[in-house]
Amino acid sequence: MGSVWDCLIMRVVDMMLRVVFLVVLWVVLAVAFPMFGFVVMVMCSVFFIMLRVVEKIFLAVGLIEIDRYSLRVVDIIPATQEITPAVVHMMLWIMLRKLRDQMMKKMARVRDDLTKLQERLEMAYRKLEYADEEMMIVPYDTTNTLFHNLRGVSNDLQDFSDEFFKHEDTFKHEDTLENMGTIERMDTMIQEVHWYSPFIYVYQHLIYFPRQIKSQNKTLKIIDSRLEEILKQELNDGLILFNLNTIVEHDIDLVGGIDQDTENLVEKLMITRTSPRVHVYGIVGERGIGKTTLARKIFDHQTIKDKFQFPSPIWVDVHMNSTFHTIMNSINKFVGYLTQDKEILVVLNDVNDSTVLKGMIDYMHLITKANVLVTTRYESVITHEGIYKHKLPLLSEEDGWALMCKLLFHDGEKGNMQHFEQIGKNMVNKCRGLPLSIKTIARILNTKEKNHSEWGKVLENIIVSLEPSNKTLPKPVYLLPYENLSLYIKQCFIFCAFFPEDYIFENNILIQQWVIVAGLVKKPSMSTAQEKEEMQLLEDVANDYYMELLESNILQPVVAECFYYDDKAMCQMHDSLRLFGQHLVQNYGYFQGDVKALEEATTSASSSCIPKLHHLVITNHAPLNEFPKIVKKQTSVRTLVFTSKLEITKLPKDLFQKLKLLRILDISGSDCRVLPKSLFKLLHLRHLNLSCLPIKTLPDAIENLINLQHLILRYCGSLLDLPTSITRLHKLRSIDLHQTPLGDMSIRIGQLYQLTSLIGFVASYSSTLKGIRHLKELRTLNIVNLKVVNELDRTILQEHINLIDLTLSSQGEGQPYEESEKKTMQECFEGLNPSSKLIQHIKINGYFGLEFPRWIRDLPFSNLKCLELLKCKYCTELPSLGGLPLLEHVRVEDAWSIKHIDLEARPWSNLPGLKSLILKDMPVWEEWTWEPHQSHPVMPVLQLLEIINCPKLRSLPQGLAYHARSLATLTIYKAHSLEKVEGFASLKTATFFSNHNLSIISDLPATCNFEIDDCPKLDVTLLPQASPTDAC
């Protein structure tokens, strides 16, 4: 036995000496002759391979004596199998490190050039945005043209970045190995090395990567030259603004008398305050009329600075999605928490929501002597009692003409000004004193020659001067809201215009698409710490855009039952506005229509003048039985959406080899059962919608979609599992699996650390919730099939501090449960106490515990806006709703065990924002107690009350009419025990269906619109001036 071990040791030592000799030889040669060093490396690798082959042959032919060397052979073969690959890979590692470092330096230079080019592009965007906001001397179509050209550069840069970072990622694995310990690195090498590894490494590092770097440099220079051409030629054509060194005067007194307005408001602010009362001063006026300029002059006035020294005046720019809490946090950063001994001045610039201002007044009234200066475009914001309102007037004829002259004439053209004064003032009068309209006309006039003939044509028809031959342009009312938008929001509006008539947008999906399309959303200024959150910041900015389009009535809300609590969750665009948006950017790469129209547009004689399509929405009135060949030819398309059903089971195999630039793909609702392999080679794809497809599985190749951010798999009834490879999609931000019955998915989902939205997470007995423990960025979480939660997982939601929307669903319907099961369910939910203070929406569905968990009963969520309790069949009491100032919607449904709602014992107090209350399918509910003894109404803005299928409810409480003084819509259906309804003086619509004992309706306003059916004991002739649609 000793001789065997001696032979083994000698064999190992001999091998190690050979390895050391060859490595030393290679290092010397690699330094002196890099090319020759590669050859030596390959020869060494071949040597080790041959060594293994020879050993196998000797063993096979019997040249090695088995009985004598059996132990040696058995021991050496495994040793050789382990050592040989590791040695080969170690040699590769040492040899390639030097070359890799050289290439990384070259890539770093490419990255620097890329960063500089991106900065120049952002500068161009900012200048174009400034020109648009300030309505400078720019031809009307110039802005859209320039923006389109810059977006073309943005698209190319984004494509380049994807390719660049893909190559850069190939080196990350080697960096990971370098950071490993020696043993761990050897183990990894042994697992990954193959006989062909040396040749792959040689090809990659000596041929492929150098070629790619050279190609990237060439591409970057081409993009840079394109941007330079735009900046030098198109941006400078009649646009001096885009000279980088040009400084433009920003504060222009559009109205006149701004100094007098400043002194008047300063005088009011100088009044000494002795009581802790909040004094509010509102400046209201059209956009661009000088509200911010006036507020800034007051803020910087020396008298104000002298009075408000400790603390200094505070300026807060209010964003579209700002809340009372975010504003107060901003104020507290400057002055700490407010106290009664301090008199402060706070300027709130551009407030759009009256509830925000009211919340501040109520809060600050009790703790400080405060002066609040508010600027707003909407008079409804400052209608609260005690607010001083300063309304900036619209322009007079003289002031309007003066503004037009500033925009049209230089200092040396005073003679021309007098020559055009009469016709110019006529145009000003047509604008009704609106500065934006005057600026719009000035932009149009700058495209015309300065003569009476051209100006007369504009005066005859201002709106159609955009395109005199086009008769489909909308009425003037549509132009002004569009002109009132910022440059980026205009482009988001245009994006929506290229969807079919009556198309319904879902806000979350629309926002995701805006962010993905290059150039639509303005990048916010970020600190280094915020750069990692750039995508979330972009989505927040896009949400602001969405809200402003709604406020401008360009997008119109659509009521949907699934989003009854959020009237802004879905929207559509009026057809006239849609046509207007399409007209603005015709021939700019957008297309929406059927296949026949696409063929005509791309194959006609004039198609050579049409730029390549990048946004393609196919809308056929009939389903498509085959994939349109014309679509495959649109190789530059980046957004492809089918709003028509594809009645084909297989997509063409080579489809996505041609459409390789796709970033947004929506084939939802098609009959496709098999996805082509080419789909999973789309490097740039970021948004993939496969909803309602009859697919049974997703291939492992989905891991190749390395830039995918949003995956939508709604209603995929045949899909039972997700592939393990999905864990490699590290940029994935949202997964929507609504009504998709997956099995165990927690381990896979749990490794997607960037997820902010997870809808349809299926909890199972085996893994329960452990998969979401590490998803710290979640804002929206929807868990289904929740039955049992391990004790270790019961605190899992306490780690998710960013949650805004939480849905917990179990299967608490259709089956009886044992008492022990009900107790277990209650214990499970008791531990799932979310700690996020940002939660706005909570939905509990199918809970079968005996009573609600404590965190539902107490609801310690100050930002809560909507509470839904559905199919909680065994709970006997509703939670207390007290101290929830932002709560707007409450819905209780399928509460089978609630007999008595006593709002005296479990009070609903301080619900100033509650707008809707829905109580549905409560078969044993008999009594509702609520007395009107509070000093103020608890639900002052309640507008909607629905009581549906509550057959045993005998009466409505006396306190309801007292507390719901703004109730506008009342619906009562199948309340068979209810006998009378009275006292709702504010009702506008009352609906009573199938209430068999209802006999009295009194003290309702005569103007109320009644809708009555199947109420046999009710005499409708006794209703005050009622106009029932039906009576029985």
Image (tube, helix red, strand yellow):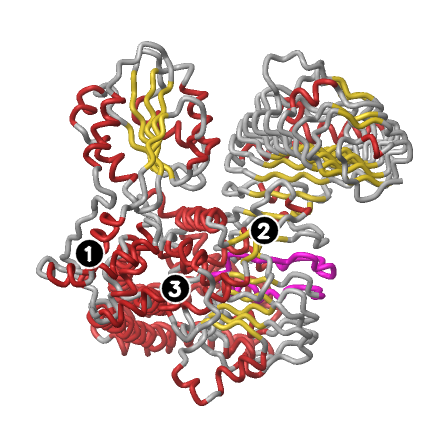
Q: Which residue is mark 1?
A: 405
Q: What residue occupies the far bottom of the structure in this picture?
A: 605
- Mark 1 / mark 2, whichever is N-terminal: 1
- Residue 68 relative to residue 847: left or right: left
Determine whether the residue tagged by mark 2 lies in a helix, strand or loop: strand
The residue sitting at 52% across, 53% down in the picture is: 555
Q: Amino acid at mark 3?
A: Ile
The circle drawn on residue 463 is 3
- Residue extent of the magenta highlight: 694-723
Relative height, residue 428 to residue 958 (above, below) = below
* Front residue (pair 633, 233): 233
- Mark 1 / mark 3, whichever is N-terminal: 1
Residue density around tag 1, few if under 14, some if 14–19, many if 20 or more, within 10 Å: many
Q: Amino acid at mark 2?
A: Met
- Residue 300 relative to residue 704: left or right: left
- Mark 2 / mark 3, whichever is N-terminal: 3
Q: Residue 783 location, x and y as percent?
A: 66, 43
The circle drawn on residue 570 is 2
Alpha-carbon distance for marks 1 and 3?
Answer: 20 Å
Q: Amino acid at mark 1?
A: Cys
